[in-house]
Image (spheres, rainbow, N blue to C red):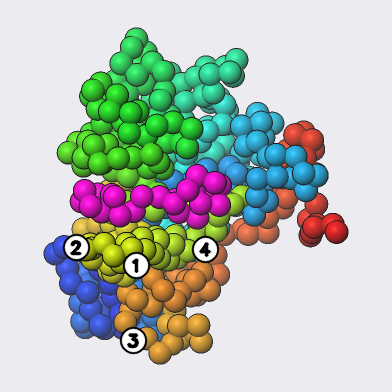
Amino acid sequence: MTSRTLLRGGCVLTLGKKTPNFATADVLIEDGRIAEVGSGVRARDAENVDASETIVMPGFVDTHRHTWRSLFRNLGDASTNGEVLDPAKLGDQLQPDDVYAATLVGLLGAVEAGITTVVDWSDLPVDPALAAAALQAHADAGARTVFVCGLGDASNAGPRMPTRDVITRMREEVGPRTTIALGLDLTSDGVGSDGDPVALSRELGLRIHVHGGSNVSGSSAIARLAERGVLGSDVTLVHAFGLDDAAARALASSGTSVSVTPSSEMAGGLGAPPIQLLIDHDIRPALGVDDERVAPGDLFAQMRETISLQHAVLFDRKLAGKAALPKLMSTRDVIRLATIDGAAAAGLHTITGSLEPGKQADVVVLRTDRPNIYPINDPIGAVVWGMDTSNVGWVFAAGRTLMRDGVLDADVERARALAMAARERVAAAGALVVRAGAGDER
């Protein structure tokens, strides 16, 4: 039986190359795909959703998040007893049930923020049981996801990378909206040697996500990767630290995508992402949340930080008397970073990221009738500068309703209870003091 949903009378931002934006239009979802966008669309037996006083647009694409860290949202870099919070040490304490709970509540939080695609980088110990628990949460949350199997820590006694058999089994067992990718550090050993993870990834057709960091010279490391033939259109660099013009040119010429996570990078002491340098080389950086311990879990905040950073850089140059300044980033530029450019960085641009007939129906419906946003003078400006998670009304992934009229279509109480129990167990195992409602003691 054909499934149809008709979103009627909204301001439709398709953000597509072939389909224009509409001040008022209808969107027909049929069997999980965008079937038609336009005025006066009719469909028999469709569920009708009144989208008047809303903006209908592609769901946001979060291109980098460590979802298991959702257990310690907003905790910062230190526990309440003053000890430094080491995510790697915490990861060693997690059992499969903990990973499931953390991943589920993290993904549900993303959906509630209008995010329909999450690239979930697992930097946990390489363990099929932990991966299986995370992937079950991916399936249960319902969002479109990319599960990135990050290489294990060299100090860990277990395997450093998943084997061909493990990857094959994961690909056979994942849900229809999840794909598998491989993750490695910018300076990973073994690239180009026997057991090379890059060679295995390309043989199996997996996307490669390369994790940068503040303790490495981004430019020299990227030069080495370029020499070894690692960079390419199937690669996404996460955290573009320490880049110079030569490194940016190497990324651009190879077609390598870049993901930046402004809130987490700055709050974690890694510095501001080089937005203008990337733009100068025609690289459109996709956006991500990264780590909810030190960053908000939505892309509204990431869009605002990105556009504000780029504007601040240009204004500083102007105050310094520099001439021939680049253009200020527009809201139309930055909304693409959070949607179609993000889909490209996730390797999913032919599937999602815009509302065009034939693409998967990953859609968010944003309320414009709330006092925080009306009157609407410019729809895209409203999304970028003014909206927040309170404006999210409906969320669809592959046509499936994940959020209905502001309420998640999920067992939120179960997810909450599982997350609280897991948080307490892992905190105790890691000798952390984490108390609900605890504040600074002065």
Q: How many marks?
A: 4
Name the residue type under label 2: Ala
At 32% from the left and 58% from the top, the residue drawn is: 337
The label nearer to you, 4 versus 2, is: 2
Secondary-structure class at tag 2 = loop
Tell me residue 45's x, y (percent). 32, 73
Q: CA distance from mark 4 to mark 2?
A: 42 Å
If you read the primary sequence from the N terminus, does the residue marked by circle 2 or circle 1 appear first? 1
Magenta segment: 261-284
Q: Counting residues from the N terminus, which is met first, the one under dot 3 or under dot 2?
A: 2
**Residue 17 belongs to the span the image colors magenta:** no
What residue is disc 1 on? 319
Report the residue at 47% width, 43% height from top.
120
| Mark positioned earlier in the residue sequence (1 or 4) | 4
Which of the numbered marks, if any, corresponds to residue 377? Answer: 3
Q: CA distance from mark 1 to mark 4?
A: 41 Å
Amino acid identity at mark 4: Glu
